Amino acid sequence: MESGIPIQRGKTYHESFSTVSFTTQKKLLEISGWEKKETTKIESELASIQRKMDSKKMEKAENLRRKKAAVHAKAHEKKAKVQTRRAQEILDAEEEAAQLQATGQIPKKSSFSCF
């Protein structure tokens, strides 16, 4: 058969095409599997980081709540001291007024500094 058409030895065109197509599909599946594996690994890392951030955020928030409570307690304590001092000043003034009334004396120093 020498008609000028080369005789193919080995695989036919369709067989070669099928092999190339199969190899390509196999590589594409491998790449897809690799992509999925890497994506899963990255998502796992992200979730781990998010949990750590949430934990730190909760710790910071708790610390700030404690500080706020401490400030509130300190303010309450300071207010109580001021009120106690004011109550003592009123008692002292009342005692002095009662003594002056009992003796009939007029105060030498005015308790009202604006007059």
Image: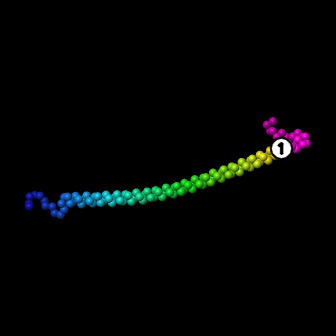
Question: 10 Å neighbourhood of mark 1: few (<14), some, or many (≥20)?
Answer: few
Which portion, as a residue range, is magenta?
Answer: 96-115
Q: Looking at the image, which residue is at 69% across and 49% down? A: 75
* Residue 30 x/y as whole percent: 33, 60
Q: Looking at the image, which residue is at 27% across and 60% down? A: 23
Q: Residue furthest bottom?
A: 10
Left or right position of 33 against 49: left
Q: Looking at the image, which residue is at 38% across and 58% down? A: 36
Question: Would you identify the image quadrant in which residue 114 lies?
Answer: top right
Q: Which residue is mark 1?
A: 94
Q: Residue furthest right?
A: 103
The kind of secondary structure the magenta stretch mainly shows is loop
User: Across the whole image, how many numbered discs are drawn on residues?
Assistant: 1
Say if 15 sits above or below 107 in the image. Answer: below
* Residue 43 x/y as whole percent: 43, 57
- Identify the element where label 1 is drawn: helix
Question: Would you identify the image quadrant in which residue 66 lies?
Answer: bottom right
